[in-house]
Image (cartoon, rainbow, N blue to C red):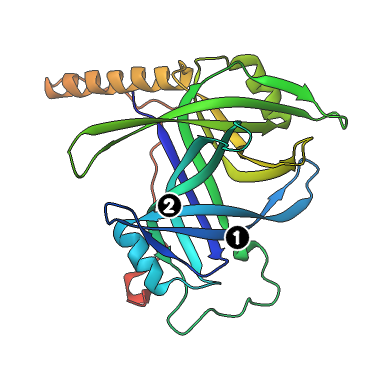
Amino acid sequence: MFSLNRVNIIGYQTQPLEVRKTPGGTNVADLNLVVPYSFRSEQGEMLTGKAFQVVTLWGSMAEFAGQYVRPGSHIFIGGRLQTDSWDDQTSGEKRSKTKIVALDMILLDPKDGQIKAPDGAKLTLGAVNRADIVGNVTRDPEIRTTTGGKQVMTLGVATNDRWKERSTGEMKERAEFHNVVIWGELAEEAGKVIRKGSRVFVSGRVQTRSWETQAGQKRTTTEIIADQCSLLGVKSEIASEAVQMSAQRRSTSSVREEGAPVAAASPEMPEVQYTSEIKVEDLPF
């Protein structure tokens, strides 16, 4: 069963780009992007911040970026989240780091350079930081209440990626495990209906936070802060009604072909008449 693991971000490169080669001769490079973001809190307050994302480029995409990407370059990336794990050689502890593996890259700067931010522009200057996943919940959700009385829920969602190795043609499969954080009313409801094994769609922004252990070692974790969480594979009354109405229309069409009287259209399916306000002669191209 297929799943979804996609991320779209628009950010700015923060440092010079280094293109490396694997032992097999493949180009690889890492972007280090800063992604400004803003979101509205439950109290209606607009909050702003910035996230830093590592993006790995492979092959011709890495070679192209090495030629044209500079510190400050404005870039769109479409890709997937990937978490790499290893054992710390000093402590022996299990370590992990989440990055974005690029599938698409678009350089956004005009040829004559970036334009100055227009005065008074706020809503139109936001960057993009969006993750969408479809997968299975790996553990029962954990819901708690903050000291301020807010509900917050955490859950794990697993997705699977499949691809074909270019060199051997062999099909490969890799599981990714995503940490999801949900706040407020959505967390309260999701905590009641979602269980281990549930199939869900989650959409939100990618956030990486850091902290220090009691031993003074720095640790990071990457989470999807979700503003949408949908339980999948659920029966829908709306869908059932639509299926029945579709069957009725097919039956009516069959009766019409035989010359019998045609039943009146359902009042719940009004005819939509749309007239465009755009005139062809007004288009600039």
Which comes before the other along the chain, label 1 or label 2?
1
Q: Residue at x 53, y 19 (%)?
A: 138
Q: Is residue 262 left or right of residue 31?
A: left
CA distance for labels 1 and 2:
15 Å
Q: Is residue 177 left or right of residue 227?
A: left
Q: Is residue 8 visible?
A: yes
Q: Is residue 251 left or right of residue 157?
A: left
Q: Amino acid at mark 2?
A: Gly
Q: Residue at x 73, y 28 (%)?
A: 152
Q: Which residue is mark 2?
A: 78
* Secondary structure type for disc 2: strand
| Circle 2 residues within 10 Å: few <14, some 14–19, many ≥20 | some
Q: Residue at x 39, y 56 (%)?
A: 57
Image quarter of residue 93: top right
Instruction: Give 98 or 153, whichever is nearer the viewer.
Output: 98
On residue 260, the disc is none
Mark 1 vs mark 2: in front: 1
Q: Amino acid at mark 1?
A: Val
Q: Residue at x 23, y 18 (%)?
A: 251
Q: Which quarter of the rendering shows the N terminus?
A: top left
Image x and y of residue 158, in percent = 48, 26
| Circle 1 residues within 10 Å: few <14, some 14–19, many ≥20 | many
Q: Which residue is mark 1?
A: 34
Image x and y of residue 153, in percent = 69, 26
Image x and y of residue 229, in percent = 57, 30
Q: Is residue 275 visible?
A: no
* Secondary structure type for disc 1: strand
Q: Residue furthest right?
A: 147
